[in-house]
Image: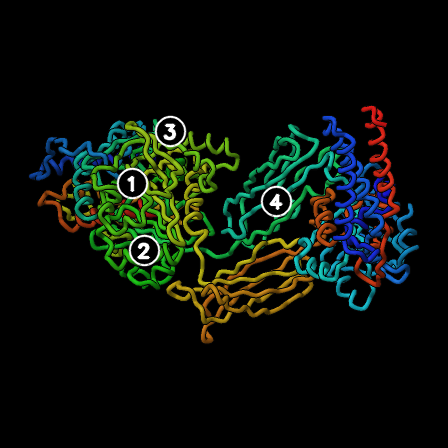
């Protein structure tokens, strides 16, 4: 329709510039038009001066417009536009050959539809006007002589790299335009700005032809899985799964977490509304030390079009380290014994205890050497920082020297350790903590009251935060966990911990005959964390329940992991992700601290990498000029598989520390995700480069459209506008309109 | 025939003691029990004494001999005074009598049994005691002497732990070092040995320190055989009872408690 009226395609009008071929100034046309309009007006007013001036004005407007249009045609208007010289330019056709093109919709795969589109005339149409080069776009861009050999088996489609490669080749080739035939899924990270800028500077119009449905009809898809990067052995871990579905709203589906084919946990979920993202949590036990590859699978439902996006893999580094916790107890208490027993069963925790048995004697357990902690609670940084967590039992605030108090603060703030304060008859408010510098560390203000410690029964209830906390999980299922907490035997005692500080989180409350009190309160402090457990009576969970019940052990093992699980060493190896799907560049980062746990800026750090098939590399990391103590590097992991990275830091030839982290490289995984046609990306690419987005249905005009390109070998031509049908139509309308009005008004 | 001979032997031994007591100027007099003012204080620890059924024997005297309440309550109360003074343990001034009939015993993770050479636990009691010990409870037995009382003690203990052995506790075990180093232990005599020219009863000539360990190498049962620590606690305030025995008995008791509260 457009061409019927305007003679030329829209592109000509978009890309062309208006010229007047007569060479006369436009001002002359304005002047002539004004003179003619004035003359016509004078004549009309003379003739229609009988009070019908409105009608005269309408007639004047119609006649003046017609005269202006006729005069304009005398000036010979035209559109100047660059056109590609026939058969002298190359059109590069990039064909998506990735796995997503094998998806079948409406009985035909995207790949076959692509072939059909080319066969239906596009290939011939292009060949008539240009030299056509076909490129297969997969892991790499490769030229192909025969597009019929597309396999749709490439694990990834690197659209951005393909475009960049073509742009680079264009220096020696007269490339007139690029045609991308794809579903738009660049699974290798999207089109980067540099590539886009190059295309625009070379004036390459990129025409895109989109394949595939823009919305799947029936599909379950895992959008994201977030899991902890590191964990201590036997830790209870939570994996957060984000998913969406189309076509199965309200139905039940099974979410399975597995490791090497062994199901770790599974649960039934109810699917949310179409297209609505929903989040589910799965809990599992980290088990033994080592790199764990855990796989989250959403079980396929009947009729699902793309089961390939139902699985995501993550890597968890289960650490072999055995963090040391120092527990100082001010007097013999049953709680002490049973905490010791609970943690003795934990192979990931090394508990060292100091028990003040008499006024003059401290009984040490779990020490490495007879001399260790001979003087009691550490008074030096080296001694204290050797631990990752501290538990302070029934110890009055005055027991600690000013040096020890300062060290404790630094232990949490700088070292990043955890400190747990237990309730007792001479601690918290009853131990003078309210007036001690140790108050700074507490998540509560104990106040200066006395007798806050009561040897009376109290039951425990989880708060909302506690129900959501991983560390308060005695059972993996949230409902069963809540029920189990409710069934726990009463505590032997409780303590009023005081008022909560800002930022404190209460995970559990004690329910006493005098009301509810915060029982388990946590807070983050500096790089570390502190907590209060305002009781010394959890031992009844062990003594008052059958031997088979492990509530007491699990509680203390979980709590100890909260205490030390996130306590960093002097070297911390960091990666942005643990699974790099279709990405080869691996950014490496290490954070290094000295013995005082202050950032170490003058160290040397290298990453020792080992991978599949004997891959081994040593990558030196460079100090980050912005952040002291941070060292950065990058490495290319070409082969898919599991890699181990040990970051090793030295200073002046002496080892500072080392840390190990794992990652996994996968190819072709993301190709199965976001399989709907990414029309937005294709349209944006075309719009930003002067091309156009096409569908297989309207692609027949593409060869003509490509002709109007400023890239390649072009010639500039002027398209006359005087013979555009719309002009004649307008003239006829103007003249006919005037004639109709005159007849109506009786003026003919 | 053997049972008859055994019975005669025991009878003669007991009879001799009765005669001995009549003939001597007996300095040990029972005093009236007075409830301490802080007797109902809520504390971390209380001296828990196990009430048990006596051994049923055709020998009426033997059946009557020995009871869960021997030395009760003076030994208990006098001992905890020492515990209070010598350790940081928060201790109640009065004892707590528990039995194996209800679940109350699970609130008292350390329990003392006197004269277990005369106990006779039912199957249900054996089962409960086993559960108690495996959950983390500690049993200290005292004041039983000679092979016969040992055998009777073990008849019930074997039903509690048929699969575990009662073994000698080595000197290096923490129970002998947790507060006091008790490498040089000796037999602590009971009051019947007054004036303590001999320290043993029956054929229990040598003090034995035995116990049953759990799977982690922690003592669950501490059997103080051929000694009478309870008497030493009870008569520690009597000038006639030798201080060296009382001192050792206190140290043993304190070590056993602190061990039970730290292992």
Here the colouring is rainbow
Image spot of residue A491 (x, y percent): 34, 34
Instruction: Give the numbered dot on residue A679.
Output: none
Answer yes or no: are tags 2 and 4 on the same subunit.
Answer: yes
**Circle 4 is placed at which residue position?**
A224
Instruction: Tell me which corner region of the image, top left, top right, bottom left or bottom right, holds residue A711.
Output: bottom right
To which residue does mark 3 refer? B122
Residue tagged by mark 1? B141
Disc 3, SS: loop
Where disc 2 sits, the SS reads helix
Choose mark 1 or mark 4, whichever is in front: 4
Image x and y of residue B88, in percent: 22, 47
CA–CA distance in space, label 1 to label 4 = 62 Å
Q: Looking at the image, do the residues carrying marks 1 and 4 touch, with CB atoms under 8 Å apart?
A: no
Q: Foreground: A226 or A685?
A: A685
User: Residue A222: where, in percent of width, then height?
Assistant: 65, 41
């Amino acid at each position: 329709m457009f061409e019927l009226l305007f003679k030329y395609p829209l592109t000509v009008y978009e890309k062309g510039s208006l010229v007047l071929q007569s060479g006369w100034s436009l001002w002359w046309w304005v002047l002539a038009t004004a003179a003619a309009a004035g003359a016509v007006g004078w004549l009309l007013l003379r003739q229609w001066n009988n009070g019908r001036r409105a009608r005269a004005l309408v007639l004047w407007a119609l006649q003046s417009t017609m005269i202006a249009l006729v005069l304009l045609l005398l000036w010979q208007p035209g559109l100047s536009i660059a056109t590609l010289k026939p058969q002298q330019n190359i059109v590069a056709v990039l064909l998506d050959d990735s796995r997503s093109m094998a998806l079948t919709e409406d009985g035909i795969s995207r790949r076959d539809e692509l072939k059909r589109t080319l066969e239906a005339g596009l290939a011939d149409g292009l060949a008539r006007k240009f030299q056509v080069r076909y490129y297969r776009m997969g892991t790499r861009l490769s030229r192909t002589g025969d597009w019929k050999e597309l396999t749709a088996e490439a694990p990834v489609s690197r659209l951005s790299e393909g475009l960049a490669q073509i742009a680079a080749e264009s220096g020696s080739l007269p490339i007139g335009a690029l045609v991308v035939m794809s579903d738009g899924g660049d699974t290798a990270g999207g089109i980067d700005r540099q590539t886009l800028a190059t295309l625009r500077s070379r004036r390459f119009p990129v025409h895109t032809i989109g394949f595939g449905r823009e919305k799947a009809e029936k599909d379950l898809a895992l959008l994201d899985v977030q899991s902890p990067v590191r964990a201590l052995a036997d830790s209870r871990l939570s994996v957060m799964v984000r998913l969406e579905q189309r076509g199965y709203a309200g139905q039940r589906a099974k979410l399975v977490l597995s490791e090497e084919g062994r199901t770790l946990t599974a649960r039934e979920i109810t699917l949310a509304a179409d297209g609505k993202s929903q989040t589910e949590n799965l809990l599992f036990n980290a088990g033994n030390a080592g790199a764990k590859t855990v796989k989250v699978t959403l079980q396929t439902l009947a009729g699902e079009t793309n089961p390939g996006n139902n699985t995501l893999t993550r890597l968890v580094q289960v650490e072999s380290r055995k963090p040391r916790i120092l527990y100082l107890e001010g007097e013999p208490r049953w709680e002490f014994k049973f905490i010791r027993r609970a943690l003795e069963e934990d192979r990931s925790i090394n508990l060292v205890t100091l028990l003040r048995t008499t006024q003059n004697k401290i009984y040490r357990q779990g020490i490495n050497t007879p001399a260790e902690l001979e003087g009691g609670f550490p008074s030096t940084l080296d001694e204290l920082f050797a631990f990752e967590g501290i538990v302070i039992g029934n110890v009055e605030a005055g027991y600690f020297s000013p040096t020890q108090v300062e060290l404790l603060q630094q232990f949490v703030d700088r070292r990043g350790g955890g400190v747990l304060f237990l309730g007792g008859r001479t601690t918290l408010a009853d131990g003078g903590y309210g007036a001690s510098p140790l108050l700074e560390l507490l998540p509560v203000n104990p106040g200066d009251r006395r007798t806050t410690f009561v040897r009376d029964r109290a039951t425990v209830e989880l708060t909302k935060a506690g129900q959501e906390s991983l560390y308060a999980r005695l059972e993996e299922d949230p409902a069963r966990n809540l029920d189990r907490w409710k069934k726990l035997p009463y505590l032997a005692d409780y303590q009023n911990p005081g008022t909560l500080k800002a930022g404190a989180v209460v995970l559990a409350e004690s329910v006493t005959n005098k009301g509810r009190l915060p029982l388990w309160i946590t807070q983050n402090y500096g790089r570390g964390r502190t907590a209060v457990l305002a009781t010394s009576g959890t031992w009844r969970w062990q003594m008052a329940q059958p031997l088979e019940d492990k509530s007491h052990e699990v509680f203390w093992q979980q709590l100890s992991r909260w205490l030390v699980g996130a306590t960093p060493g002097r070297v911390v190896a960091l990666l942005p992700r643990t699974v790099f799907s279709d990405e080869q560049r691996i950014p490496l980062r290490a954070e290094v601290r000295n013995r005082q746990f202050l950032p170490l800026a003058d160290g040397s750090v290298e990453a020792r990498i080992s991978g599949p098939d004997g891959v081994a590399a040593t990558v030196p990391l460079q100090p980050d000029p912005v952040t002291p103590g941070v060292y950065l590097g990058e490495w290319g992991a070409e082969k898919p598989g599991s890699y181990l990275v040990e970051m090793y830091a030295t200073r002046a030839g002496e080892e500072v520390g080392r840390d190990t982290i794992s990652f996994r490289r996968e190819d072709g995984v993301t190709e199965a995700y976001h399989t709907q046609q990414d029309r937005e990306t294709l349209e944006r690419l075309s719009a930003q480069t002067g091309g156009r987005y096409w569908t297989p249905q309207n692609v027949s005009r593409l060869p003509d459209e490509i002709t109007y390109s400023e890239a390649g070998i072009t010639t500039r031509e002027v398209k006359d506008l005087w013979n555009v049908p719309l002009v004649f139509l307008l003239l006829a309308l103007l003249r006919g309109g005037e004639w109709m009005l005159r007849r109506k008004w009786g003026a003919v | 025939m053997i049972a008859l001979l055994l019975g005669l032997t025991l009878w003669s031994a007991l009879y001799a003691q009765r005669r001995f007591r009549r003939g001597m100027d007996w300095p040990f007099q029972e005093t009236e029990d007075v409830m301490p003012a802080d007797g109902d204080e809520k504390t971390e620890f209380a001296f828990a004494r196990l009430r048990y059924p006596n051994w049923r024997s055709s020998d009426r005297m033997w059946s009557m001999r020995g009871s869960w309440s021997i030395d009760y309550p003076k030994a208990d109360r006098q001992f905890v005074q020492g515990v209070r003074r010598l350790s940081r343990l928060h201790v109640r001034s009065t004892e707590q009598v528990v039995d194996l009939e209800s679940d109350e015993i699970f609130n008292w993770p350390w329990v003392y049994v006197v004269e277990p050479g005369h106990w006779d636990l039912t199957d249900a009691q054996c089962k409960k005691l086993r559960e108690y010990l495996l959950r983390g409870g500690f049993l200290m037995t005292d004041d039983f002497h000679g092979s016969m009382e040992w055998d009777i003690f073990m008849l019930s203990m074997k039903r509690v732990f048929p699969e575990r052995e009662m073994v000698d506790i080595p000197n290096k075990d923490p129970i002998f070092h947790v507060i006091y180093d008790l490498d040089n232990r000796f037999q602590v005599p009971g009051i019947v040995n007054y004036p303590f020219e001999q320290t043993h009863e029956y054929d229990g000539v040598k003090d034995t320190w035995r116990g049953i360990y759990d799977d982690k190498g922690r003592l669950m049962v501490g059997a103080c055989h051929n000694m009478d620590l309870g008497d030493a606690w009870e008569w520690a305030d009597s000038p006639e009872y030798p201080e060296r025995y009382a001192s050792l008995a206190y140290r043993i008791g304190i070590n056993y408690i602190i061990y039970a509260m730290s292992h």
